[in-house]
Image (cartoon, rainbow, N blue to C red):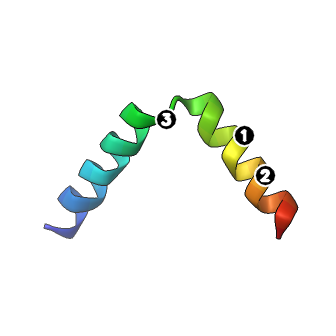
């Protein structure tokens, strides 16, 4: 059940944000912290 929920969230995030956006977002968050 947990895995399915995580998978669903991952799919939603992937659909909402393209890999490039995720990469840039991670880079910004790592830079700020």
CB under 8 Å between callouts 2 and 1?
yes
Q: Is residue 27 left or right of residue 8?
A: right
Q: Residue 9, how many percent across, how many down?
A: 31, 53
Among numbered discs 3 and 1, the one appearing first in the sequence: 3
Mark drawn on residue 24 = 1
Q: Name the residue under label 2.
A: 28
How busy is the neighbourhood of tag 3: few (under 14 within 10 Å), some, or many (20 plus)?
few
Mark drawn on residue 8 = none
Residue occupying the point 74% across, 59% down: 29
Q: Residue 25, how many percent across, how many down?
A: 68, 47
CB under 8 Å between callouts 3 and 1?
no
Residue occupying the point 86% across, 59% down: 31
Q: Residue 18, how many percent across, how many down?
A: 52, 29
| Gap between marks 2 and 1 measured at Cα | 6 Å
| Gap between marks 3 and 1 measured at Cα | 11 Å
Q: In which quarter of the image is residue 15?
A: top left
Classify 13 as above or below 4. above
Mark drawn on residue 17 = 3
Work out which residue is located at the far left of the displayed protein and give it.
Answer: 1
Which structural element holds mark 3? loop
């Amino acid at each position: 059940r947990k895995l399915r929920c995580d998978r669903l969230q991952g799919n939603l995030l992937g659909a909402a944000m393209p890999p490039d956006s995720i990469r840039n977002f991670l880079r910004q968050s790592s830079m700020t912290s």
